[in-house]
Image (cartoon, rainbow, N blue to C red):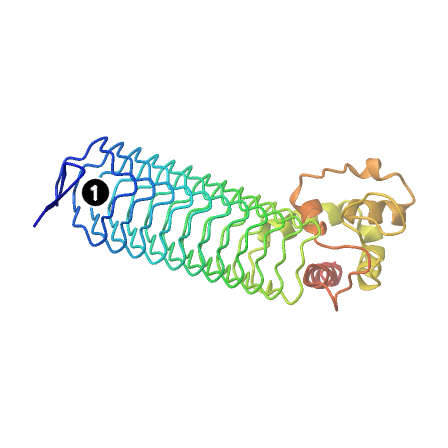
Amino acid sequence: MSESISNYSIKAGANLTNANLRDANLRYANLQDANLTGADLQGANLRDANLTGADLEDANLQSADLYKANLSGANLQSADLYKANLSGANLWGANLKGANLKDANLTGANLQGANLILANLKVTNLTGANLRDANLTSVNLTGANLTDANLENANLASANLRDANLTGANLTGADLHYTNLEGADLRGADLTNANLASANLRDANLTGANLTGANLYKANLTSADLTNTNLENANLTTIWADIDNVLSMSRAEVPALLLALQQGRVDGSTYTGPCACLIGTLAQARDCHYSDLCPDADRAAERWFLGIQKGDTPATNPVSRLTAEYVERWLLAR
């Protein structure tokens, strides 16, 4: 069954290329496999519409209402969905490469396996959304709300999640290498087995987060809040190996480093002062200038120490505790 709107035939498989359907009422419409390339659907009512497999490349869907619409397998490459309502929509396996979803509402939407490479999701609401296995490489999620979202095994490599809200999000097995998570809220998030190599976690809130088995090689933890964070089984092999290299060059000064950790006199952000970083603390113990110990702010050991601030002790900071425990084992083995 089909109907006519603005002289267009609305039916499955319809050819609506470049059609002007602005503000059209298409609620419950069956547009399965329809060609809507370049169509103007701004402000259109597409609630509960069937757009399975539809081609919406370059379509204008600004402020369109797609509540609970079925867009599984649809092509939305480079589509403009600015401020669109996609809450509860089914976008399983959809192609959203380069799409503009800025300030869109995707609450509870199903985006499992969707392609979102280079998409703009700035300040988008993805509360409770399913993004399992989705490809979010280089996506802009600045300030986005991903509270309780499912991002299991999602690819977020090089994505920008600055100031994003990921409270309670499931990031199990997610690829977050080179991802910008500066200032992100990750309280209670599950990052089990996540790849955070070279990720920027500066000022991130990881209170109560689970990082079991996570890869933190060269991750920037400057001023990150790691209160009650589970790092017990995180993959820190490369970090410990690099710390071992540093300690091996300053064997006599290692006891002083351990004491400084225990007394809260380590500050990973500075080479000088009464509370200094790894290299700075060892240099003070040797009574030499820190430059004599070949400082390198980019090496894994020094980046790890960025997670320790003045006053942090093994009792109050998990990075300090794990480091002190490692140093103690290091000393016992010598």
Question: Which residue shows up at 58% across the image and 62% down it?
Answer: 187
Residue lying furthest left? 1
**Which residue type does callout 1 highlight?**
Ala
Q: Position of residue 121 (x, y in %)?
A: 45, 44
Label tally = 1
Residue 283 quadrant: top right
Residue lying furthest right? 287
Q: Nearer the viewer, residue 13 or 24?
A: 24
Left or right, residue 198 beside residue 62: right
Location of mark 1 (residue): 54
Q: For label 1, count other residues whose C-alpha is less than 10 Å away and answer few (under 14), some (14-19) or many (20+).
A: many
Q: Position of residue 183 (x, y in %)?
A: 63, 50
Q: Position of residue 18 (x, y in %)?
A: 23, 30
Q: Position of residue 64 (x, y in %)?
A: 34, 46
Left or right, residue 100 beside residue 268: left
Element assignment for label 1: loop
Residue 280 quadrant: top right
Question: Which residue shows up at 56% across the image and 59% down it?
Answer: 234
Q: Nearer the viewer, residue 167 or 240?
A: 167
Q: Nearer the viewer, residue 117 or 54?
A: 54
| Viewport quadrant of the C terminus | bottom right
Left or right, residue 53 beside residue 231: left
